[in-house]
Amino acid sequence: MNGGLLVSKIKQLGDRIFEKILARHGIDAFNGAQGRILYALWQEDGVPIKTISEKCGLAITSLTTMLERMENQGLILRVQSTGDKRKTLLYLTDKAKALRDDSEIVSRQMTDIFYKGFTASEVEEFETYLDRIRTNLEEWQEP
């Protein structure tokens, strides 16, 4: 079985193609990794860093540098929670909100590439398997 190797290769190729599609559309306000963070915030704005870490599958240590860069680019605001001073909440700026349509165009192109030649039932079945793998990974604990 070489599922892990295939998943790694798919991620590597997908990231590379995503960056090329961003460039083709002249989108330079964010990169692929930042796009995942923006996507999560477009779904729910004003959430703690920990929530974004979980939704994007990024370690908080990796996320901290990315968030600092995104704040410097004017994409997000980091605001200390009034309810819990230990939490920092992330908010989209107007600049980031305006990028949503561009991101959706790129995401649709990526989906078309991923599922080229698949029937609707194959896509549904495949995504069920992917979700099971995601669950297995999230539930994994070191022995």
Image (tube, helix red, strand yellow):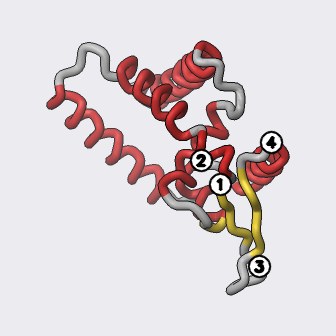
**Is the residue under label 3 in contact with that under label 1 (CB below 8 Å)?**
no
Does dot 1 land on a helix, a strand or a loop?
strand
Q: Earlier in the sequence, mark 2 or mark 1?
A: 1
Quick one: label 1, few (<14), some, or many (20+) residues within 10 Å? many
Residue 143 seen in the current view? no
**Residue 80: percent from the left, percent from the top?**
77, 74
Q: Residue 73, which numbered label?
A: 4
The residue where tag 3 is placed is 86
State how far apart marks 4 and 2 are (Cα): 13 Å
Going by the image, does 23 lie left or right of 7? right
Does dot 2 land on a helix, a strand or a loop?
helix
Number of labelled discs? 4
State how far apart marks 1 and 3 are (Cα): 20 Å
The residue where tag 2 is placed is 97
Q: Residue 35, which numbered label?
A: none
State how far apart marks 3 and 4 are (Cα): 24 Å
Quarter of the image for residue 30 reads top right
Quick one: label 3, few (<14), some, or many (20+) residues within 10 Å? few
Q: Earlier in the sequence, mark 4 or mark 2?
A: 4
